[in-house]
Amino acid sequence: MDVGRCFLFLLLPSFLLLPTHSQTSDSFTSVLVSQNGLDFVKNLLVNKAIASIIPLQVPRIEKSMRIPFLGGIDVVVSNLTIYELDVASSYVKLGDTGVVIVASGTTCNLSMNWHYTYSTWLPPIEISDQGIASVQVEGMEIGLSLGLKSDEGGLKISLSECGCHVKDITIELEGGASWFYQGMVNAFKDQIGSSVESTISKKLTEGVSDLDSFLQSLPKEIPVDDKAALNVTFTSDPIYKDSSITFEIDGLFNKRETNQVLKSFFRKSLSSVICPGNSQMLGISVDEAVFNSAAALYYNAEFMQWIVDKIPEQSLLNTARWRFIIPQLYKKYPNHDMNLNISLSSPPLVRISEQYVGANVNADLVINVLEANQVIPVASISLVIRGSGALRVMGNNLGGTVSLQDFSMTLKWSNIGNLHLHLLQPIVWTVIQTVFVPYANDHLEKGFPLPIIHGFTLENAVIICSSSEITICSDVAYLDSSQLPKSRLSLPGSMPLETKWL
């Protein structure tokens, strides 16, 4: 992976934390990269940047001079190659309009070939020699200053400044009469240093350009299934503070590949809840409108309708079991099989508070009698189901389970006389508990994707509920060990890159 794409890990909403500023009305997921997250990504970035540029070829250097009584002297330094970089320390800092990354105390090892010729007029002869040399650059500092702006729902990156400064160079010649020419080659130190500086700066500039192209090619939605996608377009320019960078994304569910929002949603003002101690690398703040947009999408797709013809207590789906509850039903249809048609009359409504995550579901239950090849509706009951939810993070997905709290019933119409709904309550409770709740949990447990970059995963996640939203506080691990750099590298305080985090 090149240095440009590597920096993507720093910029995209892989690292999210609840911000404290007000949101725009079209942003339902808030993204903040904390200082701990920045430091984690910076360490990964520096490692991968080094791996992407090593080995690095430096242009050849030629120097000619004329010495009285000796004649012309030509010295050529070629095949100058940087084969090793060691970073003593590095840091990332946020400015008013961008991100600054600095690597200092860097050492750089190079190899090169040298060739030396001179001619004399007394007597007229030409003398030449050649060999190899090792070069060590010490005290090198490398810096990048990058600007970020939103661009038609994506991110655009620009290079504000890029620099590399070499402090000291040591050259050791090998081969030929190297001891004789050492002083002459030492005269190349300034030129070698300048060439190293310009070569590294050019490589980093190319990497930023590659990153900008890569950012422009990123998809604007994350597929969930064949019906839904998560809208991950950026809604405003990033906001910079002393130790954080904040992004805002849409975050709502849309119809897959149409980018069509089915309903207008509004985000309430943010609460003051933050991750405890602000120590986690990331958090994901999700407004309840995100859940409600998913509910509206699947409801409008007519995905929330069930025909119940098999239940654990199958005798409940025969009129004989209802003979004392609804005598008219048994009298009119004795020993007939039945099914129950349950359909939602409106999208489920999710509510989140500090103590509670719940949903209200409005549904219609139609009682059908099966006679020969006919399905005969005999009564319809309106249900208001109230459930509570338990959320959990599974990998990079947010899922959970729902449990039934209570429900109420209202008779809509009946072809079998008046119904005593309180007598029906145990049967309806059983149907909801054994059919509706397990069906809902089967889908909820799969969860939906959080906006995490491929190759990263959440670790030790904790979920905090506040007014109208949840915040997932978590550390992050990088899983793509197959692409981790193999070059020698020293980064104090960084994680060992050969560890497989899972």
Image: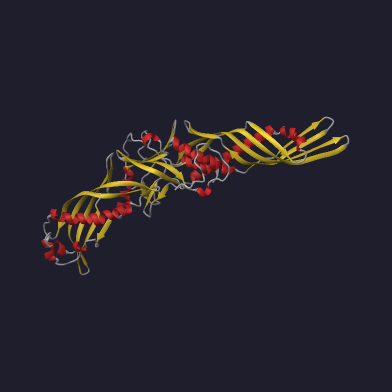
Q: Is residue 457 left or right of residue 359?
A: right
Residue appearing at x 76%, y 36% in the figure: 179
> Does residue 160 appear in this view?
no
Q: Which residue lies furthest to the bottom in this view?
A: 372
Residue appearing at x 34%, y 46% in the figure: 392
In the foreground, 467 or 44: 44
Residue appearing at x 13%, y 53% in the figure: 422
> Does residue 442 appear in this view?
yes
To which quarter of the image does residue 204 belong? top right
Q: In this view, does 375 lie to the left or right of 56?
A: left
Instruction: Name the spot of residue 187 as percent of width and height, x first.
Output: 72, 32
In the foreground, 67 or 461: 461
Q: In this view, does 94 lie to the left or right of 470?
A: right
Q: Residue furthest right?
A: 123
In the foreground, 117 or 308: 117
Instruction: Name the spot of residue 447 as percent of width and height, x first.
Output: 35, 50
Instruction: Name the spot of residue 378 as percent of width and height, x first.
Output: 17, 61
The answer to whether 220 is drawn above or below residue 160 in the figure is below
Instruction: Name the spot of residue 478 as percent of width and height, x first.
Output: 47, 45
